[in-house]
Image (cartoon, grey):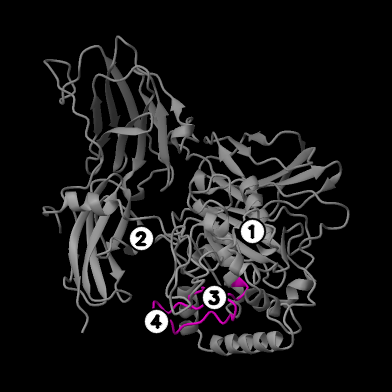
Amino acid sequence: MVRHLLLLPVLALLLAGNVYAQRTCGANEVLLRQLQENPEMQQIRDAIEQRTAQFIQSGGAKDRVVVTIPVVVHVVWNTSAENISDARIQSQIDVLNADFRRTNADAGNTPSYFQGVAADCEVNFCMAQRDPNGNATNGIVRRQTNVTSFSLNDNMKFYSSGGSDAWPRDQYLNLWVCDLTSGYLGYAQFPGGPANTDGVVCDYAYFGTTGATPPFDKGRTATHEVGHWLNCYHIWGDDGTSCTGSDQVSDTPNQADENYGCPSGSIVSCSNGPNGDMYMNYMDYTDDACMNLFTTGQKNRMQSLFGSGGFRAPLLNSLGCEPPSGGNCGTPGGLSASNVTQTSATLNWNSVSGATAYNLQWKLSSASTWTTVPGLTSTSHNLSGLTAGSTYNFQVQADCNGTTGSYSAPASFTTQSGGGCSDPYEANNSRSAAKSITPGTAINALIGTSTDNDYFKFNVTSSNRNIKVDLTNLPLDYDLRLYRNSTQVGLSDNPGTDPEQIIFNNANTSATYYPRVYGYNGAFNTSQCYTLLVSLSSTAWRTDGSTDGQVTTIEIPLDFEDAGFAMWPNPAIDHLTVEVPLEADSDVQVSIIDAAGKAAVQQQRTLVKGDNQFTLDLQGLSNGVYMVQVRNGEVAKVRKLVVNKP
């Protein structure tokens, strides 16, 4: 296990300035995996390519009518930030429509020498108004999950693995939004793959235009991935720099490798001068603001899917964009339960445009019949008389002046167990939802699930600016943190059920302080409460909890457990094992940086307190000297790596 390592902090700081946020798409990796898992898929892919060639040979998309594709967006969320708004989803649909119809505001940025091949792909997108059962819908499915992040293994596409099941691909484009790992912005399934995983996946941080993370905040991640879903390859042919690959499109110049950032002028590669790479194409890797076109050749590939016998031709007969007869009333989303006690709970949901009332149904999860509460005029309702320690389901239907929509997918909650204690402070799982407590008064509360975080808040006075926070009566291994506004100023993570204590002297009277209680490694107990006590003093607290003597306060930020990380083997051939010790759970960025300062490999990983071990794939790296950088917040650690392949 690694504890004491000599590192290169100065070099790390210098290299860190050269690491730039880069687009990473997993579509090609997923295609290769699916072909390995199902060799018969290659025959389907070959047939699609043959039909595409025939379609283009017969004249292409000249006489095609505009295709309209119903879209269902599956929002699979663990934290509130991942539960993106309806407005943000609509902003993404607006971008897709603009980009695929070439009505995008930046179409004029296409260089004059590529304007002649820039194309209106004649593909529109609508939010589904009718679900597979014929009921009204707003085209959004929200699934709260205990899964903190997803990889390229398609788990977000199955309810059984924490995701949301696909709607029929012959009627809808399924678009999943979730937290993706390893730095991937998104990925798509090419035509020909399994029906139950067909669609597009986007990381929530790069979806839509309102609140997305720059430089991928213009909705072009979804445009890029839907391009794959419509059978367009990466423009450089995924061949590295060999100039031998192809995207099977004649009007996109052959280019060596992907382009990043926001280039300008001509970039000549693979003898494609004088105009050079078409780096502003949606199927390259440039930043959102620098993408602005599909070509006629790419349009032909897309439209061939909708020709006679085309793989996606059944979508032409979908009724997903048409509301059910009798009008359209959307489906409520955002179902949640708050203020859950042993015998009561407040049920909440999002409003539906045009709704004048809501019908609520609830039941024990083990029951076969629902109890209906009709005609509710608000978006919340309090249930009482419930049974302690029991799981309940509830669903909501919107009523638009007598026209009812479909019931939402059921949500669930569990009442507090009897014989223990109740928690009147839920829901307080984030700093923005923190509940006020009174210093000097002990409170009792629960960590009721593996993802439960209890946030509280208080203020100090000018005469009592010294803080002591005690966490006692622990049923399991719980830890304690203290924040001054959003800055962490204290951490106590004793092992087992040992009490936790944080002392912070000379506090700022203009700030709000937030204690946070959580279970280490997901520890929780649904019946036994912990006790939290905030004490304020006019005299500085000593480390033994007393106020005797003089005290000097030192603020220590969260950092690596000791001095760094370990890695092996070194020299390496095709893989590298990395071990990172942390003193607390944290998000860490891992990069392998080449001699030019470019991140050849870059991953985001969520690591836990203690020793974390994972493997990096080096097969795409050439022989040479690299720097491996592990960044935790503002702190970066670096080790030299030699890649030496036989």
Foreground mark, 1 or 2, reads 1
User: Residue at coordinates 74% horizontally, 76% vertically from top-left?
Assistant: 314
Q: Label 1 amino acid?
A: Ala
Q: Position of residue 275 (x, y in %)?
A: 52, 71
Q: Name the mark nearer the viewer: 2 or 4.
A: 4
Residue 423 visible within the image: no
Residue 166: say if magenta. Answer: no
Q: Outermost residue toward the right?
A: 326
| Label 4: which secondary element | loop
Local SS, label 1? helix
Residue 603: which disc? 2
| Neighbours of disc 2 within 10 Å: few (<14), some (14-19), many (20+) | some
| Residue, disc 3 | 233
Q: State the separation of the CA atoms marked 2 and 4.
A: 25 Å
- Residue 148: % across, % down: 44, 54
Q: Quickly name the residue at label 4.
A: 242
Q: Earlier in the sequence, mark 1 or mark 2?
A: 1
The amino acid type of the residue labelled 2 equals: Gln
Q: Which label was assigned to residue 107?
A: 1
C-alpha span from label 3 to label 1: 21 Å
Specify the amino acid type for callout 4. Answer: Ser
